[in-house]
Image (spheres, helix red, strand yellow):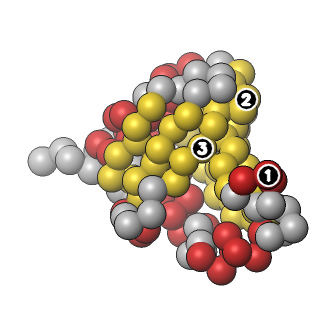
Amino acid sequence: MRSYQAATRIDAPPDQVWGLLTDVHGWRDWASGVDRVEGRVALGEKLTLYATMIRNRPFQVTVTELRPGEVMRWRGGLPFGLAVIDRTYRLDGQDGGTVLTVREDQTGPLAFVTERSTPDLDPSFRQFCAGLKAVAEGRTSRHSG
């Protein structure tokens, strides 16, 4: 199993962070590693992510868990569970702010296939956390002048 993770403390309440996190169409404005996301965030719905590091290979996932203000989880990978990619966005309210944790686990009998074709996501996850922190705290966005 291969895992990636990043976390940050955001000086904003969980409901504000949740609103930004689940507005996936707005990610391109502050998440510098994301070109665009197609689909809608709802349990069982499919999303297609276009990341800057792998533009030629969109990543399709299904929303498998959605607990407002707490957790959004996606699952993707190869058919029949041969390689499973689980990505979790977790929000924990703490002292008037929010701790955001982004984690991805790659499992399954053919997980080595996704491991070989996936670059190290830790820097991208750190960048995502920093972008969400900045926009939630009202400091900046990728497209601000």
Question: Which label number is shown at residue 61?
Answer: 3
Question: Which label number is shown at residue 65?
Answer: 2
- Report if the CB atoms under discs 1 and 3 are less than 8 Å apart: no
87 left or right of 81 in image? left
The front one of 118 and 33 is 118
Q: Is mark 3 on a helix, strand or loop?
A: strand
Q: Residues within 10 Å of mark 2 (few under 14, many from 20)?
A: some
- Measuring 37% from the left and 64% from the top, which residue is drawn there? 55
Would you identify the image quadrant in which residue 23 lies?
Answer: top left
26 left or right of 107 in image? left
79 left or right of 117 in image? right
Quadrant containing the N terminus is bottom right
Q: Which of marks 2 and 1 is nearer the N terminus?
A: 2
Q: Which of marks 1 and 3 is nearer the N terminus?
A: 3
Q: Is residue 110 visible?
A: yes
Residue type at the position of mark 2: Glu
Where does the image place residue 141, in percent across and percent down from the top left? 29, 45
Q: Distance between the residues labelled 2 and 1?
A: 19 Å
